[in-house]
Amino acid sequence: MEDELRWQFTAQMLYSFIVAAMTVMVPLYLLEKKVDIAWIGVILSVGPLSFMLIRIMFASIADDIGTKKIAIVYSISNLLAIAFYTVVASPIGFVMGTLAEGIRASGFWAIVRTELLSTEGSGKPGEVLARFSNIRQLGDGLGRVAIGFLLAYLAFTGAFIIMFALSAALLVLILTEKSASNASAHVDGNTLKRIFKRRPPTFWHASVLQLLVWLPYDMMTSFVIPLYLLSSLKLGYQEVGIVLAALSLATGAFAILIMRLGLSNRTLLTLTGLSAIALVAFPLMGHGGIWMVMPLAMGAGCGTIVGEYILVDQVYRSRNVSTDIGVLYAPLKTAEFIFLSLGGVAIAAFGFAPLFFVLALSTALFVIFGRATIRDMHK
């Protein structure tokens, strides 16, 4: 059991490091290649679109064949994404790279929570998911600060080479994992029934809450803040990496501290509102907006904890955990696709402030509508 948890720790840390670094690097790389900012959002939107379409299928298949084959697929997709960005440095190459990243994310998120929930003796479901969320946050922060220095000293070519080497190491790590599943992947009537079965209203309420809590964090770290810091505040790559790393590491640190304090979900939900305030202030304060990173991180840390508990409340009794989690997050990926598709155009026409305000509104709505769900969970 301890060996399995150690393996999960290593794999998730390495994956999070690579993905965070790529998340910072790709939009900056597109700017470096003189891609119009309106098109950057369109290109990046291919990721959540492919994620939405592929993740649910991966998740349902994983409920039949286990998780290792899906893990192999996502690790190979990571290598392909880097190859497309570097070898086919053109609009079609960028789209193919983003598509491969969508497949990578689909595979990882289709199985990661299932693997943790199926690890007997790892702890209470909500606690173990929140704990590993903090672990991924640590890897995320390290990846963001590292890529800033790599870009500053090795440029994009050197940074891509290092990311490729780390992705190859992740593939080797996954291939050496022991797995009892030898079934072959297939899609049949049972797969489709699992995906399209009727689900209670509480499930979709929880799905909307996941959209509201994760959309701000995902979009601000992968799209809005990196482009804002580089193109509007004119920070260098190293400075962008440091700011994003501070946000990610502080989010994880606050989440760990808050879990140790044992605050109630109701209190956590209230503190999540700090993110909404910080998101409104960020673009209005110029360079001073960088100081909003700390309240933004505290609110995000609280929100992610509440989000994991809401997720567990919906799926931990399920016979098809991977499939239900995949369906639960489909509205989130739809929202991300729309946000990215229109976001670049909105920036070109109106600047960054409207996007910050949309993300602040999403956080505020999570705080407002999450109270009923938290109350029902306690009952």
Image: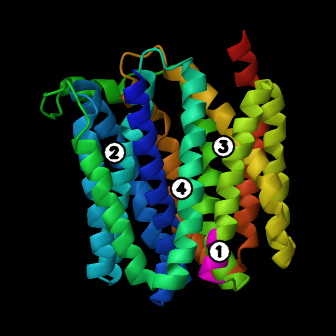
- Among numbered discs 4 and 2, the one appearing first in the sequence: 2
**Disc number placed over residue 213 in the picture, else none:** 3
Question: Is any atom of residue 99 visible in this view?
Answer: no
Which image quarter holds the N terminus?
Answer: top left
Disc 4 to disc 2, C-alpha distance: 18 Å
Which element type, helix, strand or loop, lies under badge 3? helix
Looking at the rendered structure, the kind of residue marked 4 is: Glu
Q: Are marks 1 and 4 in contact (CB under 8 Å)?
A: no
Front residue of 127 and 274: 127
Front residue of 204 and 254: 254
Disc 1 to disc 4, C-alpha distance: 22 Å
Q: Please report the bounds of the magenta region as a residue range.
A: 236-241
**Disc number placed over residue 240 in the picture, else none:** 1
Which element type, helix, strand or loop, lies under badge 2? helix
Looking at the rendered structure, the kind of residue marked 1 is: Val
**Disc number placed over residue 336 in the picture, else none:** 4
Quadrant in the picture for residue 178: top left
Neighbour class for label 1 at 10 Å: few (<14), some, many (≥20)? many
**Disc number placed over residue 107 in the picture, else none:** 2
Q: Residue at x 32, y 46 (%)?
A: 54
* Residue 229 left/right relative to 20: right
Mark 1 vs mark 4, foreground winner is 1
Q: Are marks 3 and 1 in contact (CB under 8 Å)?
A: no
* Residue 214 left/right relative to 320: right
Disc 3 to disc 1, C-alpha distance: 24 Å
